[in-house]
Amino acid sequence: MSQELPRGFEYAGVRCGIKRTGKDDFAMIVARDGAVAAGVYTQNLVFAAPVDWDRRHTPSADVRVVAINSGNANACTGQRGLDDAYAMARLAADTIGARPEQCLIMSTGIIGEFLPIDRIAEGTRLAAMQLGSAQENFLAAARAIMTTDSFPKHVQRSFTVGEQEISIAGMAKGAGMIGPRMATMLAVITSDARLTPADAQDALLSAVELSFNCISVEGHMSTNDTVLLLASGQAGGEPMTGRRLAEFTECLADTCAQLAKMIPNDGEGATHLVEIDVRGTASNEDARRIAKTIAESALVKTAICGADPNWGRIVSAAGYAGPKFDPQQVHLLLNGFRLYERGVPLRFDAAAVSESMKSQRDTRIELHVGDGPGHCRFWTSDLTHEYIRINADYHT
């Protein structure tokens, strides 16, 4: 099936001088006929002004524009930051004849510096001139929201519900300060499905729980995390309900998962994408806590960086994660090699396991801790010398 962009949206990405690097740093996504919008945000008590604005304006039945800047987070900026967030919404809305409350905003970059509103104004002007619905417009917007990312992160999907063809397109940014819920990441998902605001919010919450809330680079929860869903409804028909809504939610979750995996895969300085699959716990939340603890263990992450099949670090991390389990029922596989079974280590070819880690970017950890129904799949990256260099040098 063709991978068309969702109907009803225009995109633009431009350079307006916010980033010190001189790279593109402002994006707009426009739904001229309006879109239902939903949002999920950081749970950090210290949150940025754009998060405050968007929380107050989602879910919504009529959003016309999303404005995104990179290079400045507009976080920890007090009342001026809130005023600047409003100004950014007003400037972007003015370009298409909308009201400020019909605009959602996102910012990412350096914390504690005031937003350069004159540059934001220039960004909205330039973006409005370059809006389009072609693939190159979408990709330009995806590039403009990057900070330390090494590549633009985007996904497009088309699928059929009944006789309707529905399209979803998502873009995200994030490479460091990743620790749900959520991470220093922004994501915008656009779709031409027809949804009610309440159903859009529920679908996005469900999708985020299985994707963006299952990634971590170093466990540091950011101030700006935002995932937005915009649905133009231009696929037609009545708002989705029942089985059709469930099928849409499943496809949305899969789209979010594809985007989410790109973030730890692009973890600053990362050489491995690590998938952690925990099963057999009393609940899914218990499995998530164990997986997240393993993912954020510096000892586990450095062992993977060094291609060291150090089963002890993985098993011990599970043991202090909090959820109860019987250590005598624990089984551990690393890249398909069985290292630990029923509470004791097995004889294995350490050189072969190490080579399997060295020779491929993906590393898979499978941990079974019992026969309960709980399950979680979680993604992280390894911890490298390059990660330390990047974050030691990054201006905050």
Image: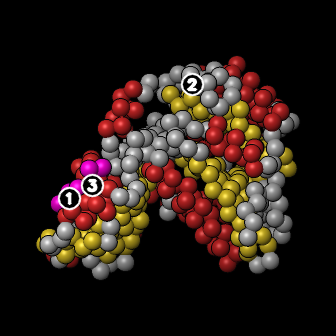
* The image quarter in which residue 332 lies: bottom left
Q: Earlier in the sequence, mark 1 or mark 2?
A: 2
Position of residue 385 measured from the top left corner of the image (x, y, whole percent): 31, 38
Q: Which residues are magenta?
A: 305-315
Q: Is residue 371 above or below residue 106?
A: below
Identify the residue shown where x is 38% and y is 32%.
391
For disc 1, the marked residue is 310
Please state if 339 lies on the left or on the right of 249 as rendered. left
Q: Is residue 3 above or below residue 386?
A: below
User: Looking at the picture, which amino acid does disc 3 mark?
Assistant: Ala
Q: Earlier in the sequence, mark 2 or mark 3?
A: 2
Disc number lying in front (2 or 3): 3
For disc 2, the marked residue is 21
Identify the residue shown where x is 74% and y is 45%.
136
Q: Nearer the viewer, residue 43 or 69?
A: 69
Identify the residue shown where x is 65% and y is 22%.
17
For disc 3, the marked residue is 307
Q: CA distance from mark 1 to mark 2?
A: 40 Å
Density class for disc 1 (Cα within 10 Å; few <14, some 14-19, many ≥20) is: some
Position of residue 165 measured from the top left corner of the image (x, y, whole percent): 78, 70
User: Looking at the picture, which amino acid does disc 1 mark?
Assistant: Asn
Position of residue 43 measured from the top left corner of the image (x, y, whole percent): 47, 46
User: Looking at the picture, which amino acid does disc 2 mark?
Assistant: Thr
Disc number lying in front (3 or 1): 3
Q: Are marks 2 and 3 in contact (CB under 8 Å)?
A: no
Q: CA distance from mark 3 to mark 1?
A: 9 Å
Which structural element holds mark 3?
loop
Residue 233 belongs to the span the image colors magenta:
no
Position of residue 109 measured from the top left corner of the image (x, y, whole percent): 53, 31
Q: CA distance from mark 2 to mark 3?
A: 34 Å
Identify the residue shown where x is 78% and y is 29%.
126
Instruction: Point out the image quarter for the C terminus.
Output: top left
